[in-house]
Image: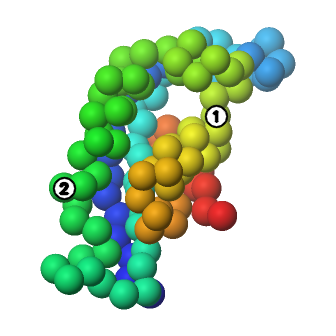
Amino acid sequence: MFKISKEFHFSASHQLCRMPSGHQCARLHGHNYIVVVELAAAELDACGFVRDYQELAPFKQMLDDRFDHRHLNEVLGHDAVTAEFLARHFYDWCKARWTETAAVRVSETPKTWAEFRP
């Protein structure tokens, strides 16, 4: 199996409204998110790629247009926009466009990651 990945960045705010009122994540706060999209294929295409990295440009454009410097609860209409939630959301977006999508990882801090991999 061949695997490739590409990293993307955006900054946004969110609030985890389901947390107890004293929890720090219940307050409005923001992160510098890192998103890694992983694609996999058993065979390479005629050019020797799983997929040309340039073909992932629409994902970066979508992040810039819809997510960067926005409030994620409003963008997604959800009161618990966790890294796990974002990983699944971005996975579904990518999988609808690129069948080779294998997983999406989301980081909110330098020490934490969430991943969705079916």
Front-most of 109 and 3?
3
Front-most of 115 and 31?
115
Q: Amino acid at mark 2?
A: Gln
Quarter of image, res 9: top left
Q: Position of residue 11 (x, y in %)?
A: 37, 26
Q: Is residue 100 left or right of residue 78?
A: left
SS for dot 2: helix
Q: Is residue 95 visible?
A: yes
**Which mark is on residue 82?**
1
Q: Position of residue 55 (x, y in %)?
A: 24, 55
Q: Is residue 62 left or right of residue 72?
A: left
Residue visible at 70% across and 26% down in the picture = 80
Q: Position of residue 16 (x, y in %)?
A: 69, 22
Quadrant location of the C terminus in the rendered image:
bottom right
SS for dot 1: loop
Q: Amino acid at mark 1?
A: Thr
Q: CA distance from mark 1 to mark 2?
A: 28 Å
Q: Is residue 111 above or below residue 21?
A: below
Residue visible at 56% across and 48% down in the picture = 92
Front-most of 70 and 20?
70
Q: Is residue 87 visible?
A: no
Q: Earlier in the sequence, mark 1 or mark 2?
A: 2
Residue visible at 61% across and 56% down in the picture = 116
Q: Which residue is mark 2?
A: 54
Residue visible at 28% across and 52% down in the picture = 56
